[in-house]
Image: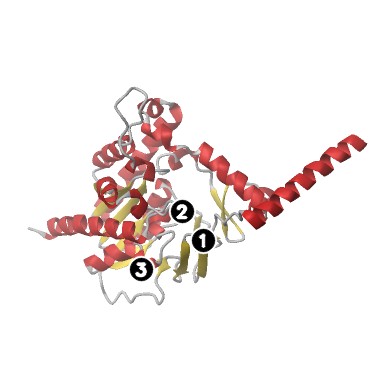
Amino acid sequence: MLRSFAVALGLALGVAGAELALRVLAPQERSWLEIYRADPAPPFVSLAPGVAVTIETREGRWHVYTDARGRRVGRPPADAGGRPELLVLGDSFALGHGVEYEQSFPARAADLLGFAAVDTGVPGYGPTQYREVLESLLASGERPSAVVVSLFLGNDFTDCVSKPRLQVVDGTLVEGASAWLGWLVRNLHTARLIGRVYQRLAASEDALFRDASWKRETLARAYATFGEELARIAELCREARIPVLAVVIPAKASLAPPAEPSASAPDLALPARKAALALETAGIAYVDLTEPLRALGPADAYLARDGHLTPRGNEVAAEEIARALRVQLREATSP
């Protein structure tokens, strides 16, 4: 009994010491946003209305404001003024995670086109949620003038099969985690560090760069669902006679210089080719940001720690989107 007590006490003191050391020497930043609300209908989670928060990290300071419908807007919100609407579907990249709203590609692209942005991007969403948002919006009678689907190749394939039902706890998005685990992550720096290490090991992008991985059950099923969701989005837009464009955002690792050809070398262009095939099969026009972001340079295109697009990366994305959409809209209105 005394031995067990001594072991337990030693472990407790060790954890307490590690927690204190992390808080003093290497504090772990929060990896979540308290900006969500639960909804009774799919996709069951959205941004809360009337959000006004300041987010500070070691990479900068940015703000999130939402309107009465839970959509990210600027401060003050721009007046649509009768302009056509550009609906953007997506996840944290579509939200403009890490930058001010005016620097995000939805806001920039809409401005270049003379449109009003309707940004429905929500961190944690995947292709299934993109489709659910579009279905709900069209069913409510909204008719945007164009739709942009933001696809991040770092996780949008696997999000089609591996993501549990999203939940909200105290405004925080929880992906199948228990309440006590969520409490630990929100309050202990050691738990945050362990969680980051685990996610980095578990979410390796290397599998996406190897052809054999796409033939295994999980990724093969993910790719099939990915294609089905895109096909449904294309069908919904076709029925509503709304032009739709996809923007393909590569993972930062895809921009690395290609390795020497060999049987073991990763194929960094493979995820983009897979996405292109799914989009072409669905009949959705797209812009692939791989080359424009590579020309900009990974260090200038992506936030070093956060992994999302920098203001300059967002600007490049907006320019490519606006250029492609102008062509689509011109073709849609030509005799």
Q: Are marks 3 and 2 in contact (CB under 8 Å)?
A: no
Q: Looking at this rendering, what residue extends furthest in the front direction?
A: 25
User: Which quarter shows the C terminus?
Assistant: bottom left
Rendering coords of residue 154 (x, y %): 40, 43
Determine whether label 1 and label 2 are within 8 Å by CB: yes
Instruction: Name the one closer to the observer, 193 or 48.
Output: 193
Q: Is residue 264 left or right of residue 289?
A: right
Q: Secondary structure at mark 3?
A: helix
**Residue bearing mark 3:** 102
11 left or right of 90 in image: right
Q: Is residue 248 visible?
A: yes
Q: Secondary structure at mark 2?
A: loop
Q: Is residue 85 visible?
A: no
Q: Earlier in the sequence, mark 3 or mark 1?
A: 1
For label 1, the crowd category at 10 Å Cα-Cα, with few meaning under 14, some 14 to 19 and many 20 or more, is: some
Residue drawn where x is 46% and y is 38% of the image: 161
Tell me the CA gap for discs 1 and 2. Answer: 9 Å
In the rendered image, residue 97, in percent from the top left (x then y), is placed at 43, 59
102 versus 250 height, above or below? below
On the image, the x and y values in percent for residue 38 come to 55, 58
Sequence order check: which comes first, mark 3 or mark 2?
A: 3
Question: Pointer 2: what residue?
Answer: 306
**Spatial separation of the CA atoms under disc 3 and disc 1:** 19 Å
Q: Amino acid at mark 3?
A: Glu
Front in this rendered view, residue 312 or 231? 312
Mark in front: 3 vs 2: 2
Which residue is farthest top? 263
For marks 1 and 2, the one nearer the N-term is 1
Q: Residues within 10 Å of mark 3 (few under 14, many from 20)?
A: some
Tell me where residue 81 sits by quadrant. bottom left
Q: Which residue is mark 1?
A: 57
| Vertical relation: 289 (above or below) 112 | above
